[in-house]
Image: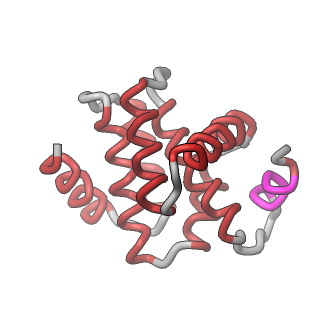
Amino acid sequence: MFDALLRKLTAPEPDPLDTSDARLAMAALLVRIARADGEYARDEIARIDKLLAARYGLGPFEVTKLRAEAEALEAEAPDTVRFTRAIKDAVPYEEREGVVENLWEIVLADGARDHEEDALMRLIAPMLGVNDRDSALARQRVEKKA
């Protein structure tokens, strides 16, 4: 089902993804960060749905379908580097800070920061081209909302 997208993501010099593939890569990255601690909690799933609906203007059925596809892709995809490269190529820098903020929302959705999630965030933010300071500011913005 995701063979073509996985081939694009694993190509040595991948072309930028089209809008629907970039959306799926973003959703899969959200799923990956939610699963990083070994627990894919209801709070995290609900937050993923909320973020996808807001970011892409999707209704409940479209969000559920996108998340289900993202869960399957995340399970099949080889590594986080491919997702971040696809997103970095598809999303302007100003919006990538918003992506990092969305990722922090998932990390903090269950009320606890886990070591595995923190480690993955330290890996993802720089791969998206977002420095540690801006990632920390994004996390602080999310914590203030909570």
Give the answer, above or below, for where 35 lies relative to 144.
Answer: above
Residue at 28% across / 32% down in the picture?
A: 113
Toward which corner of the image does residue 69 lie, by quadrant? top right
Q: Residue furthest top?
A: 39
Name the image quarter holding the N terminus.
top right
Residue at 46% across / 33% down in the picture?
A: 45
Residue 146 spot, x, y in % from top left: 17, 42
Q: Residue furthest left?
A: 144
Residue 16 spot, x, y in % from top left: 70, 74
Examine the residues drawn in magenta and state their main secondary structure: helix
Residue at 16% across / 49% down in the picture?
A: 145
Give the answer, above or below, for where 91 lies relative to 49.
Answer: below
Q: How many marks?
A: 0
Name the foreground residue: 61 vs 51. 61
Residue 50 spot, x, y in % from top left: 40, 47
Residue at 30% across / 59% down in the picture?
A: 135
Q: Which residues are magenta?
A: 4-10
Q: Is residue 82 magenta?
A: no
Q: How is the image coloured?
A: secondary structure
Quick check: 128 left or right of 20? left
Residue 95 spot, x, y in % from top left: 41, 72
Q: Is residue 9 magenta?
A: yes
Name the foreground residue: 18 vs 53. 53
Name the foreground residue: 43 vs 84. 43
Quick check: 9 left or right of 96? right
